[in-house]
Amino acid sequence: MTSPASGTPVPPGPVPIGPAKGTPQPLLAAQGLTRTFGVGGLGHRRHLYAVDEATFEVGSAEIVALVGESGSGKSTIARLLARVYAPTAGDIWFQGVPLARLRSRADVLGYRAAVPMVFQDPFSSLNPAYRVSHGIIRGLKLHRPDVPAPDRLAEAARVLEAVGLTPGREVLHRYPYELSGGQRQRVGFAQALAYKPKVILADEPVSMLDISIRIGLLNVMARLRDDEGVSLLYITHDIASARYVADRMMVMYAGRIVESGPVEEVLGNPRHPYTQLLVAAVPDPRAELAVTAEMTKGEPPKVIDPVPGCRFADRCPLAREVCRRVTPPLLELQPGIQTACHVAADDVGRGEESAGGPVGSVQRQDLLLAAGRDPGQPERDRDPGDGPPA
Ligand SMILES: Nc1ncnc2c1ncn2[C@@H]1O[C@H](COP(=O)(O)OP(=O)(O)O)[C@@H](O)[C@H]1O
Ligand code: SF4
Ligand SMILES: [Mg+2]
C-alpha cells in the first residue's frame, strides 16, 4: 500500500495497536477508517460521520469485542470490513493486502469467504424454505474446492457438530422452523465455518436470544477460536458478555474508537472517562450496557458535520478547554492499551502529543496522509463524499 499523497509505502498501523495473539502480521487491519452518510435534502446536504478515523487490528485466533451504545458506529464498521460499504476515507488490509486491491470476482468472493458475517436476527437469517443442509452445502460448493463433492455431507455435518449441533447428519435435514433461536444462530456460525474463515464478523449475534441461552453461543464462539483457530470481531452492547468471551476490547463512542486493549485491562482499569462511566454503570456483571443519567446529560454527540474536539466533551465530567478544541487522537498510553483522551494522556505525561503538540501533530499527519487526506484541511471541511458501494 502506498500513501496517495506521498507515494511512499504506508504500513498498516503507525498508531501501535497492541499485541494481537498469534502471528505478528494482523489478519485484519484498519487505519483512519471513515464512513459518512449524506443526510438532509438538496441544499441542506450534511454528512453524518458514522465511523470516523477508526484504527485497529484483529490478530489470529482472538476474539475482539467492539462495544458501544446504539448508534455509535459498530455495525458500520462490520459492514465496512465485509465490503458492504466502501470507506469514505482510510484503508482496510487483509493479511497485509489492501482491500482496494481486490478487484476480480474471485478475489472478492475469496475475501467474503475468509471474512464472513453472522447477523443479529436468527429468525430472518435462514431461508425458511430450505433445510439446514442447503446453505452449508452451497457454501462448500462455492468456497471449498478442497472438499470434493462426495465429502460435502460429511464436512457439513462436521461444521454443525463444531458449533454444538449434534448429531450433525440429522440436523442437516431439519428446516429452520424446527429449530430454536439459539440453534438457528448456531447454524449461522456453522455456515460461516463451512467457508473456512479467518475472521467472523459477528454483529450482536446473541442480543436477540434469551439470556439463558446466550452463554451457549458465547461458548460456541470461544470454541471456534480455540478449536478451529478462527478470529472473531464480536460486536455487542453487552459488556459482561464481552468480558466473558473476548481477549481484547474496543470501545466506541459517536463513531470514534475511544479506548482499546486487553479486556481485563480496559474494564479493570479504564482510562477513558466514557469507559469509566460504562464500567461504573454495570456494577452487576450480568447486566447489559446501561446508558446512565451521567452519560446522557449535556448535548448528544455531534456526528453530523462534526467540528474538532472530543465528541464526549459535553457529557464528560473531566472536560477541559482543550477538549472542545482538539480531537484527542488514539494514543498508546501503555503497552497494548490505546486511549483517546487529553486528560488520560496528561496523566502519563503525553498531554502535549494528545493536544496536537509537536509529536502529536506528526502522528496525526501520518494518519491523514495514510487515509489519503490533506492534513492541512480542517476536520469539518474535508470532502466526505459517500463513496461508491464496494
Ligand atoms: N445507511 C445509512 N444511512 C444513513 N445513516 C446511517 C446508515 N447506517 C447507519 N447510519 C447512521 O450511522 C450511525 C451509526 O450507526 P450503526 O453503525 O448502525 O451504529 P450501531 O451499530 O453502533 O448501533 C447512526 O447514527 C446511524 O443512524
Ligand atoms: S478528551 Fe476531554 S472531554 Fe474527552 S473524554 Fe478526555 S477529558 Fe473528557
Ligand atoms: Mg448495530
Image: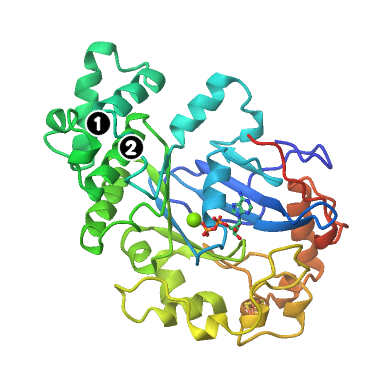
Which residue occupies 66% across, 33% down? 100
- Mark 1: C-beta under 8 Å from nearest atom of ligand 3: no
For disc 2, the neighbor class at 10 Å (few under 14, some 14 to 19, many from 20) is: many
Q: Which residue is disc 1 drawn over?
A: 132
Q: Does residue 182 sit above or below 86 in this rendering?
A: below
Q: Disc 2 marks which residue?
A: 126
Compared to residue 252, the image places residue 180 above or below, namely above
Mark 1 touches mark 2? (CB < 8 Å): yes
Q: Residue at x 34, y 68 (%)?
A: 240
What is the secondary structure assignment of the residue under circle 2?
Answer: loop
- Disc 2 residue type (three-letter): Leu
Inspect this view and state whether residue 25 appears. no
Q: Hey, which quadrant is residue 102 in on the image? A: top right
Label 1 crowd bin: few (<14), some (14–19), many (20+), radius 10 Å? many
Which residue is nearer to you in this view: 310 or 287? 287
What is the x, y in percent for residue 183? Answer: 22, 45
Residue ID at (79%, 49%): 369
Is residue 318 at least partly visible in the picture?
Answer: yes
Q: Quadrant of the C terminus?
A: top right
Residue 331 percent location from the top left of the image? 64, 65
Query: Label 1 amino acid?
Result: Val
In the picture, measured across the screen, residue 18 lies left or right of residue 390, that is left
Counting from the top left corner in percent of width and height, residue 358 is at 81, 68
The CA distance from mark 1 to mark 2 is 8 Å
Nearest the eye: 39 or 295: 39
Q: Is mark 2 within 8 Å of ligand 3?
A: no
**Rendered residue at 40%/34% (across/down):** 197
| Callout 1: SS | helix
Front residue of this view, candidates 181 and 34: 181
